[in-house]
Image (cartoon, rainbow, N blue to C red):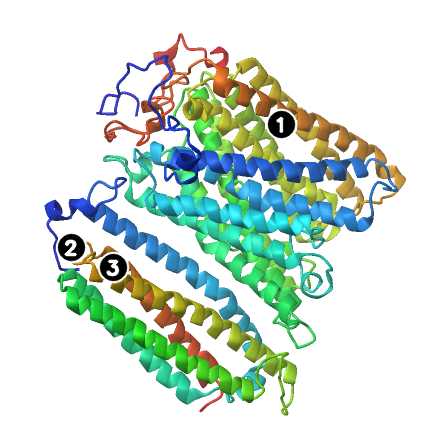
Amino acid sequence: MNGAVATEIDIKTEGEFARPNYLSEHTVRSWLLTTDHKRIGILYLFTILMFFTIASIAAALMRIELLYPTGGLMTSETYNKLFTIHGTLMVWFFLIPSIPAVLGNFVLPMMIGARDVAFPKLNLMSWYLFVLGGAFATWSLIRGGVDTGWTFYTPYSTTYANSHVISMAAGVFVAGFSTIVTGINFIVTTHKMRAPGLTWFRLPLFVWSLYATSLIMVLATPVLAITLGLIALERIWGVGIFDPNLGGDPILFQHMFWFYSHPAVYIMILPGMGVISELIACFSRKRIFGYAWVACASMAIAMLGFLVWGHHMFVSSQSVYAGMIFSVLSFLVAVPSGVKVFNWTATLHKSSIHFATPMLYALGFIGLFVIGGLTGLFLATLSVDVHVHDTYFVIAHFHYIMVGGMVTGFMGGLHYWWPKITGRLYPEIWGKLAALATFLGFNLTFFPLFVLGYLGQPRRYHVYPPEFQVFHVLSTAGASILGVGYVMPLIYFIWSAKHGRAAGPNPWRGTGLEWQTSSPPPTHNFKETPVVTGEPYDYSPEKDVDLDLASI
Amino acid sequence: MSISISPASSQEFVAEQFDDFAQQRSAAQLGMWVFLATEVLFFGGLFLGYTVFRSLYPRDFAAASHHTDVLIGGVNTAILLFSSTLMALAVRAAELRNQKQLIWLLLGTSFFGIIFMILKGVEYDKDWTGHLVPVLNFEWYQPNPGHAQIFFWLYFAMTGLHAIHVTVGIFLMLILALLARIGKFTTGHFTPIEIAGLYWHFVDIVWIFLFPLLYLAGHR
């Protein structure tokens, strides 16, 4: 779209910090009552960082406990509560809102040339719902926590658990509605708010992936909501449809839970894939290979995601024929995922690659996602799954997708759009170091878990045979490096928001509409509504021979 | 809709993020439709539960369903359908900018919603005295009381969730009637009435499914 945007942007701010901008007002009131999608994205950023910190501390305590085969630091009950805190907070209060509610909120309207999302007040309401849900979850933790695991399996959660299941379920229930509201907003915004000339197949791939994600949010989350409602009712009332004493079916809970939670896994990877498409195109100065295929692959993953929940239940007394069908359908997900990976790689071929920090995260993403995705195929294989079900193999697999994929994508995207968000550049050398530390630390933390799982260590136990200790020590060592990799950006981002060099409107010379306005953007994003006349990712290496994005 | 609005007169109530009235209206409509899709899946969990247990225990479900009050249920079905008619007419009144008619139709819609809730309350009272409330006072002298309890558990969960939606709708209509009274929707800005109508019809349609499943399964 570079040069194809009919409305010329005022370039007087080039190389400077644009004022006034969306951050110009400083009162608390201007933040708490804002309907500006950019400010709401920042509110979300601070909120999810808080939950990320709590959940990371829980993980750190678990990793320390696992240093010794006999445990000893804590009781089994405390350990159960720690992995529940870690899972629940990471999934619902960090990963699901991470890219969509922070980066998506910030850039989606700008990417499509809109002044705001379709329903700005609902957007703010979604943040308040999220905070309310977070308050319930925190309340549940303060009163002693939950020990059911993030999956709330019945009949343990409904009958036997002696912990604060209801307040945690209420927290997830309310946070779920915040997700739904965000999903509705994104769908309507993408349909109705696009700038003139911005047809569906001119949309940036990040918008496509957010659209696919939003469909899942809107269609899967309500099923989780009703399921958690049924759990809470059954706990309060003492009976319910999951109660085998009446003739109810605890397995029905698993069906309903995974009907939500498997699609939700794709809420936790599709937005990351969208970010990676943006990064790969920008830092290899090339149009994404097979653009339309990558866009359609997002939609295909979203659709197939609804048809594979049974692969979580291969050993839950599901019929073998159902297992076979779910297995085949799960394999099918590998097709659109493969399309994406191959197309990113093909984009890199004969391109001019700039190894800037966001690109390091993007390349890391591809490698980690390939490992995570391929081990997913192992788990979709019936016979293999019987062996590794509920072992550390599963833990390693989904952390490669969710941390190696989504969190890496989130960090890459945050670095990429940071100059747009704050108007300032982060220190590039520190950025590269952090990207390297997370990549190395991550692999050291989670690769040994594949081996552990293959050797048969079940998940959710804190006592294990002594011959497994070496893998646990490696993993804990890796986790400490990973921790450093997350703390470093926290420090230099805060520093750069005030002291960083002014970025100017378009430090990466990106072609997306979000780069065609000043940094930080004005309240309504654009001085005039842009008109789009060309294809997306209109990069050409010849135009920027002098360009060195890796050392700006 | 066949009514056309002149954009010049309607620009005043277009929110700043929209370019014009048509964009705002179609965004609001799509937003409500997507929300209703969410609602379908929200109720869907309960319908799934009903389907599973009815196919597992068809006889016990029929026997339990026989204890519901098909007369009150039937009357309530008619009442909801009638209130939906009033709602549809209210949308028309807003489009035609007929303020007086709009106010009365909105009040009528919520009035029949309230009648529905009162009858529902009478019915719940009958269920209580008939010892049909799971756990609290459930008594069952036919085979498989557990299965019958599942039926009534679902009956209360489904009609209860529906009743919450009706209550929200009643308050929505009353608020819209108040706003209509100060002339909000008779200047061409009828979108809120239109999307509130979509919600009310949805609540109606949920009942259209609940009635045969819960009341008619045991009556032939």
| Disc 3: which residue | B179
The residue mark sitting in front, 2 or 1, is 2
Left or right: where A58 falls relative to A102: right
Q: Chain of mark 3?
A: B
Left or right: where B33 falls relative to A319: left
Q: x, y percentage for residue A524?
A: 30, 32
Left or right: where A449 falls relative to B70: right
Query: Residue at point 22% right, 45% down?
Result: B14
Mark 1 belongs to which amino acid? Answer: Tyr
Mark 3 belongs to which amino acid? Answer: Leu
Quadrant location of the N terminus of chain A in the rendered image: top left
Q: x, y percentage for residue A496?
A: 51, 18
The residue mark sitting in front, 3 or 2, is 3
Q: x, y percentage for residue A16?
A: 37, 13
Q: Which mark is residue A486?
A: 1
Whether residue A535 is visible here, answered yes or no, is yes
Query: Residue at point 37% right, 36% down?
Result: A36
Please identify the quarter of the rendering in which residue A72 is found.
Answer: top right
Mark 1 Cα-neighbour bin, 10 Å: few <14, some 14–19, many ≥20? some
Foreground of the two, B158 or A542:
B158
**Could you give the CA–CA distance between mark 3 and mark 2, rounded to whole angstroms?**
14 Å
The answer to whether residue A108 is above or below residue A438 is below
Q: Which mark is residue B188?
A: 2
- Secondary element under disc 2, as helix, strand or loop, is loop
Query: Residue at point 37% right, 81% down?
Result: B76
**Could you give the CA–CA distance between mark 2 and mark 1, rounded to whole angstroms?**
54 Å
Q: Chain of mark 1?
A: A
Q: Earlier in the sequence, mark 3 or mark 2?
A: 3
Please identify the quarter of the rendering in which residue B206 is found.
Answer: bottom left
